Amino acid sequence: MSVVSKACLVNGLPDYGSEIHDLLYLCTQPLGTWLKVPEVEKAGLEFTSFIHAEEGIPTAEAEELASNFSGMTAGIEELLFAKFMEVIGRFPDESANDYYTQAREFVVRHPVCDIDVLKNGISNVPAVVQIVIQQQFYEPVPASWAIGEGVPVCDHCGNAMKKGVAGLVCRTKACVATHSSKSTTSIHVSKLVRVTRGIRQYWIEPGIDELRLYDALLDHGISASLYPFRDRVDIAVGETGIDLKTYVSPETLGTKFKRGIGGLAHYDERWLVIPDWQANAVPSYIDRLIKAMGRRDVTCLTVSQALNRLLNEEAANA
């Protein structure tokens, strides 16, 4: 609040940091629409919001920036999945890796899920892992989500839909950005569960594009591993490791990777991949990302560029 107030006063703007509720609402909007100060543009945050408008939780950019001020946000994701990782860690490494991939793929493909489908869909993992998924990853769908007799489910990503100005709208940002709304399935609210808020943030939103790329590779006959070694990277194709990120701000993402590349370090070819819809929404996204990252050992691509490059490599090796 104090940082915002100072920026407003220095630049002759209304003091948007003086009232917490007003500021929280404004933080659900792109900073460039209300905090028109040079620092926002310089940091590449003009298209960035700090709070998910629907979820009411910090965005990836907010958490990344907050990590520079204190350790309060450090380890949030680790704490969220601590029980899950502890349970699968009791099994041999190869089995644990497989259970992780199975569980995460199922959850991303089922942001909302019929209770019976949830029970049957994860039957290939041990009972103790099933219990963690059912009890900690899912929760009842709010009754307010029902439209008529049930909750409409998106044909593209499997998430619940809601009423919009022109009709039904998917609740998944990545889906809205790339598909026209379509739902041919509706499930009674009493039989439906949804992933919890933290899972939606860390797994579902980025996972939609991860699975699109993974499915496209398999459709073209390219062998790929999804979330190998318990999420060392998102996708591995031979010695190529792929991390997919959906940050609105290329500068914030670039700064994150400038500090370290995580699991990509285990691969000869290291790719940081951005969904096309995200790259197209922000001017010169890839160029700005490369500049902010300032390193040559990671290749920055859009999803379509990554897919085309892998297809060309496959064709050349055929």
Image (cartoon, rainbow, N blue to C red):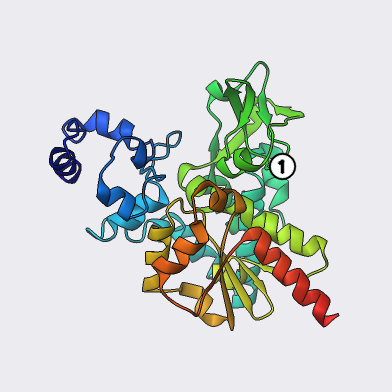
Q: Position of residue 122 (x, y in %)?
A: 68, 53
Please tell me in which quadrant of the rendered image residue 80 appears.
bottom left
In the depicted view, which residue is nearer to us: 310 or 106? 310
Please tell me in which quadrant of the rendered image residue 189 appears.
top right
| Extreme-right residue of the structure | 318
| Extreme-top residue of the structure | 148
Q: Residue at x 49, y 57 (%)?
A: 285
Crowd rating for badge 1 (residues with CA inside 10 Å; few <14, some 14–19, many 20+): few
On-image quarter of the N terminus = top left
Tell me the residue that label 1 is attached to. 117
Q: Position of residue 66 (x, y in %)?
A: 28, 55
Q: Is residue 1 above or below residue 14?
A: below
In the depicted view, which residue is nearer to us: 135 or 168? 168
Q: Residue at x 77, y 69 (%)?
A: 311
In the image, what residue type sits under mark 1?
A: Val
Q: Is residue 247 visible?
A: yes
On-image quarter of the C terminus = bottom right
